[in-house]
Amino acid sequence: MLGDLLALLAGDRRADRVVPPTGFTARLTVFASAAMAFLAVFALALSLATGRLAERWSEELARSSTIRISAPPGQVEVQTQAVLRILATTPGVASARALSAAEQRALLEPWFGPDLDLSALPVPQLIDVVETAEGFDAEGLRLRLAAEAPGAVLDDHTRWRRPLVAAAGRLEALGLMSLALIGGATAAMIVLAASAALAANARVIRVLRLVGARDVYIARAFVRRFTLRSMAGAGAGTLAGMAAVALLPEPGPEASFLTGLGFVGAGWLAPLAIPALAGAVAFAATRFAAFRTLKGLT
């Protein structure tokens, strides 16, 4: 195999003549490599984006909590002040504040519209709690709230955080699995194309054998030609995929997941490895197909 790699880098014009420079197999190899590389760029973008998403959700939800106060109208303000005093002396709480009526109306506006009258609804008072990096003892805080503010309920967002992070992790794994499937499909197509090219040149191969050419010499010619074709097609497909990703909408303040599907910073360098990986897949696939087909030719 080392000899094949050196032959790939050095090249041999006489050996290259064994492989047809144009035709169906050439077009199939270039097109398949370009299409698979294009899809691989999006699979890689999906994997990286979901990794960032899981990290962001985990950090944002892990350091924020909400306390909901449901009490008779005359007790809401009293219990709100009691909860704020408790939070001020709770280790691990960075800050805490009660949301104003305007802020709570803004939270409910997407569901009930802009003309919502909070006075007509039994809307609980919400307190936004921001944790320190160390966090606080949620069970201990719940016991203190139950003793001093019976209408207060702590929501540390655990039930929201775990499913979201798990879903993002599954999407990331799906992106990596897609990359593996794309690589396998590329290898299968190249094996078929290389086998077809070898079969089409069976007579030429028999003549080369009669004049003393060994199967290793013939196989290297096919390996070199198909590997270079695959790398060229993958390079074009990668550039097209990166351009398509760059044209996706920019994530804004209210960005959804799909608008954040892209590369960030040094992540733009990751797709540049796709042509090299495609070349490695083509090298292994063509070498396997060449020796298998040559062994069957008599």
Image (cartoon, rainbow, N blue to C red):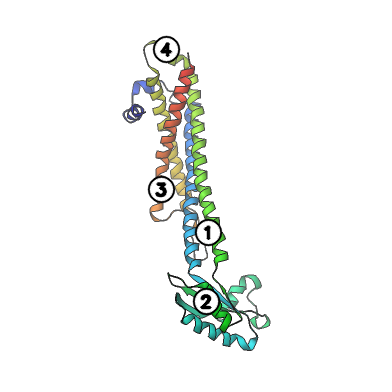
Residue highlighted by disc 3: 270
What type is the residue that disc 1 sits on?
A: Val
Comparing 209 with 109, the one in front is: 209
For the question of whether residue 257 can be seen, the reply is no
Percent x, y of residue 282: 44, 33
Distance between mark 3 and mark 2 Cα atoms: 45 Å
**Residue at the image position 40 percent from the left and 51 percent from the top:** 268
**Residue at the image position 53 percent from the left and 48 percent from the top:** 174
Of the image marks 1 and 4, the number of the one nearer the N terminus: 1
Residue highlighted by disc 4: 207
Q: Secondary structure at mark 4?
A: helix
**Residue at the image position 52 percent from the left and 75 percent from the top:** 140
Of the image marks 3 and 4, the number of the one nearer the N terminus: 4
Distance between mark 3 and mark 4 Cα atoms: 45 Å
For the question of whether residue 140 can be seen, the reply is yes
Distance between mark 1 and mark 4 Cα atoms: 62 Å
Of the image marks 2 and 1, the number of the one nearer the N terminus: 2
What type is the residue that disc 4 sits on?
A: Val
What type is the residue that disc 3 sits on?
A: Ala
Q: In the rendering, which numbered label is found on residue 141?
A: 2
Distance between mark 2 and mark 4 Cα atoms: 86 Å
Residue highlighted by disc 1: 165
Which residue in the rendered view is the most extreme toward the top?
210
Of the image marks 1 and 3, the number of the one nearer the N terminus: 1
Q: Residues within 10 Å of mark 3 (few under 14, many from 20)?
A: few
Do callouts 1 and 4 mark residues in contact (Cβ within 8 Å)? Answer: no
- Quadrant where the N terminus sits is top left
